[in-house]
Image: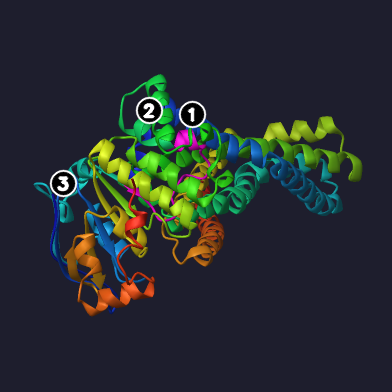
Amino acid sequence: MLAEAAWFMPLSVRARMRHEVVYQMFLTGIKSLGVITVVAMFTGMILALQTGLELRRFGQEVNIGTAVTVVMMREMGPFMTGLIIAASVGSAVAAQIGTMVVSEEIAALEIMSINPVRFLVTPRLIALAMMMPILTIYTNILGVVGGAIVGYTQLGVSLTAYFDNAIRYAENKDLYVGLFKAFVFGVIITTVACHQGFNASEGAVGVGRATRRTVIISFLTILVVGYVITRMFYV
Amino acid sequence: MIRFEKVSKRFGRKVVLDGVDMEIKDGETFVIVGSSGAGKSVTLKHMVRLLTPDSGRVIIGDDVVSEARGSRLEAIRLRFGYLFQGSALLQWLPVGENVALPLREKTDMDDEAIGVQVVEKLKLVGLEDAVAKYPSDLSGGMRKRVGLARAIVTKPEIILYDEPTSGLDPVTSRSIDRLIDSMRRELGVTSIVVTHDLHSALAIGSRIAMLHEGRIVEISTPEEFIRSSNEVIQDFLEAQYITTRGAWEKAVPS
């Protein structure tokens, strides 16, 4: 299915599919901003507090800027974004496609000679593969800002020192690898969600099962693939 | 012409179709009746290859649909319109866009021409005011009529109706019957209707096929069907209180 969806990608230049891609980007991106904002801020704040308290024992709390930024860019940014999108967007996609299967809407598309993969999967695949890196950048920024707030208010680290350290020690590679992970997670979530949706059966129970499986399989795959990518680039 | 040649289909251990042989002529309204689970919808789905027979062949004109793939299958399917039991409208699209969908996806028509076609077909089913409404805002009967408008918007040669009157009140059911009959008379299409509503079958059918336990037990005109001595048909007629002439004749569309 992934190969078939990718095969239809050149058609995204057509106005109709372009419109659908933009709409899906809005659904996956803009509509997820609220929850991502809260999760990203608190992820950065927790990271800053935990590492800051340990570093303070060695008088190194000034380095929390580096710790938070590197961890957010390499791991936590794409990871947390992936989990949120899998739970919110992935489950919604599986439920929508699953419902379409059980209510014969997919069969109706087939009879109209409209390829369901091109019509449903390709726009979602493009949208999520593009939005995941963008959302991850947003998560990274908010995480770093959250860390700065905790550093300044709880640990007495000045904002100048925090951001100086954050910029000095973070590498471009950290950003690129993180964004690459986000892109791969986007592909994983769409593929799992659409696959589960298309294989839904037995009415509402089947749709519920597809939704649950989407979240579980996406979470596990994100964990494993995240580790593999880290190992590829850093070991 | 549509021909079934010894078509058999089983799901697990259950044999749903058991060597079905039948022939449907161009321009007729062919009704398949039978009790629930008799294999009526399965028969219909074989005609557009939503299902593939375990053995036997389904032939549409010169094409063996049960063996067609890729662009050949796509071309065969474009000859069909299909009204689903639950209408199968895309819930997130308004009525107008649902009807326009096959034209937008499969033709090069511009928006204006598509709009004209959509309004024309919605007018035909009496729903020209519902263009901007969503399927969830419509009653069951209205959804079926929108489904019918979508099925005919590409001007298909053959329209398949899967339980077009199920779940509808008698008045709405008869209006759907009249629509099906007008499709045949005004558009000259071949109609294949699957139903367990005998009133509807007798009213609109050119010929009626009785499907029982995966086999066609009789194919006959409505007049012959109601007088059939076949026990299965007699039981079916009696179960729907159709035991005398006259009751069904009143339902024939004028």
- Residue A182 appears at what percent x and percent y? 55, 43
In front: B59, or B232?
A: B232
Q: Mark 2 vs mark 3: same chain?
A: yes
- Residue B142 appears at what percent x and percent y? 49, 45
In front: A204, or A194?
A: A204
Tell me the SS state at disc 2.
helix
How far apart are labels 2 and 3 at the CA level? Answer: 25 Å
* Chain under disc 2: B
Residues tagged 1 and 3 counted as in contact (Cβ below 8 A): no
* Chain under disc 1: A
Residues tagged 2 and 3 counted as in contact (Cβ below 8 A): no
| Amino acid type for the residue under numbered disc 2 | Gln
What residue is pinned by disc 3? B26
First in sequence: mark 2 vs mark 3:
3
Q: Mark 1 vs mark 3: same chain?
A: no
Magenta segment: does it hold B28? no
Q: Quadrant of residue B125?
A: top left
Tell me the SS state at disc 1.
helix
What residue is pinned by disc 2? B117
Residue count near mark 3 (Cα–Cα under 10 Å), binned few <14, some 14–19, many ≥20: some
How far apart are labels 1 and 3 at the CA level? Answer: 41 Å
Image position of B153 with respect to B206: above or below: above
Q: Mark 1 vs mark 2: same chain?
A: no
**Residue drawn at x 54%, y 49% as measured from the top left:** B139
Mark closer to the observer (1, 3): 3
How far apart are labels 1 and 2 at the CA level? Answer: 23 Å
Magenta-drawn segment: B82-98
What residue is pinned by disc 1? A19
Q: Which residue of the protein is positioned furthest toward the left in this rendering? A: B62
Q: Is residue A72 left or right of residue B236?
A: right
- Residue B180 appears at what percent x and percent y? 33, 46
